[in-house]
Amino acid sequence: MDRRRLLQSTLALGGSALLRGIAAALRAASVDAAAAGGTTADRAGADGATGTAGAAAVEGDDRFPPDFLWGAATSAYQVEGAWQEDGRGESIWDRFAHTTGRIRNDDNGNVACDSYHRYGEDVALLRQLHLTSYRYSIAWPRIQPSGRGAANARGLDYYQRLTDALLQAGIRPLVTLYHWDLPQALEDAGGWPQRDTAERFADYVALIARALGDRVTAWCLFNEPAAFTSLGYWRGLHAPGHTDARAFLRATHVVNLAQGRAYQVLRASRPRAQIGSAFDVSPTFPASASYADLAAAERWHRFQNLWFVYPALRGHYPEGVLPPEQQPELLGWRAGDEKVMRALLDFIGLNYYSASLVSDAPEGNGVPGLNTRVQWARAPGSNARTDIGWDSYPAGLHDIVLRMADETGRLPIEITENGAACNIGPGPQGEIHDAPRIAYLQGHLRELARAIGAGAPVRAYHCWSLLDNFEWAQGYSQRFGLVYVNFADRQQRSVKDSGHWYAAVAAANQVL
Ligand code: FCB
């Protein structure tokens, strides 16, 4: 594409902001093309184009701020088990995992790590690892088995006991209100593409705020809204397993409405709460230096990284993604939605695993106007892969933290997930030498320290995950835990080398 046509198409896509984004991508691309990944200093320079220039990076200083929180994360369906206990209803993940052929080895979360019964051990492990924050989620179907109506007291009781145990251990609870386990009854009524689901979510959040808001002060409204809407409604790889791009787009809008409604309900009930969401972010790189690919990488950045952030903070969607004249119909937009989806978040949660390589796809990809082909978890110049097949790209954490700080007006940031699949099991004495996980965490924490040195307001880091657990479509085949779980023998837990190493980092407040 020549420059004139590029200019025309970029103006059509959203004008000068897009050009600024492309300029940033161009610099990043030339750095990477020149140096197969570039140097630390080159990357800091590339980030300067997004508005973070001038902040002093403290090279080589791997200490963290004095009150930094060190944590680990899990989610309800992935660790709890007890799928039919104490009045819990069916979730879309129960239904999906019980359908033959959906999950590797036909695994399911019926028992998982059995944390529903062993949460006391989990809290003791967090304490042993010197951790000061635990991110866990509430299973909506334990609270409202059919997705509506009064709260199930036995479900609430479990989360009160878990939360109290954490507080007693001096660990801050960080509660995710939705980590993908929608009550099946709500999916039967239309699921996330159906507007009423936003109201149902707000009702559920009101019940939780009342029951737990006296002791939980930090909340994530959603986990990875981009991932669960796209994998669940567009790609069909996660529950509920649909492959309908239009339903997916509507789901994104309903989730944005739900984010706003839940925020308002929680804020009204608990005015001093710290309210955020955990966004799945990935720095985007053009697959080639062509202008078409540069523009595509910028479009994908806006879709992947900003689609659930701008509605909350600014009351509108990022420009240059969907064709403006089709957008209202594609999203099911109604007058006033710009107010409903506002959520003046207190902090931004970032889940980071890897970068994305993006090419232009003029033939389309199902989402009108998006026209991208994305290689997820591929990074320029990287040849390090974790066991799940995702590239390890530590510099991407630095880059995306600075870019999101810039995009969000420098709201406080918590890293709500980051970690690696490393499937090394116990040696003869039961010890677990998972050196690749230590290398992964070390690399990423160094890059995080560098981002903080450059002025990023990061206040917490949560490793995914405390425990080996049910890794969605991959079942139990991928182990992300700092702690090994023996699924064949009573879910016994053993701290891995990486767990001991991470405990020392947390105690020292410094990368070792
Ligand atoms: C994230 C999910 C989390 C876990 C990790 C590996 O996308 O939020 O539940 O599965 O990936």
Image (spheres, grey):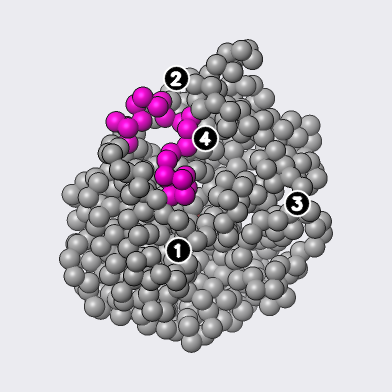
Name the residue tied to disc 4.
300
| Disc 2 element | loop
Name the residue tied to disc 2.
363
- 464 or 408, which is in the foreground? 408
Q: Viewer-nearest of labels 4 and 1? A: 1
The answer, for residue 97, to whether it is visible in the render is no
Give the percent coordinates (x, y) of residue 266.
36, 65
Which circle's residue, 4 or 3, is located before the other in the chain? 3
| Disc 4 element | helix
Dot 1 amino acid type? Ile
| Disc 1 element | strand
Which circle's residue, 2 or 1, is located before the other in the chain? 1
Q: Viewer-nearest of labels 4 and 3? A: 3
Dot 3 amino acid type? Ala
Disc 3 to disc 2, C-alpha distance = 42 Å
What crowding class fits label 4: few (fewer than 14 Cα within 10 Å), some (14-19), or many (20 or more)? Answer: many
Disc 1 to disc 3, C-alpha distance = 27 Å
Residue contact at pointers 4 and 2, CB within 8 angstroms: no
What crowding class fits label 2: few (fewer than 14 Cα within 10 Å), some (14-19), or many (20 or more)? Answer: few
Name the residue tied to disc 1.
275
Label placed on residue 33: none
What residue is at 35 percent from the left and 60 percent from the top? 264
Q: Viewer-nearest of labels 4 and 2? A: 4
| Disc 3 element | loop
Residue 324 inside the magenta-drawn segment: yes
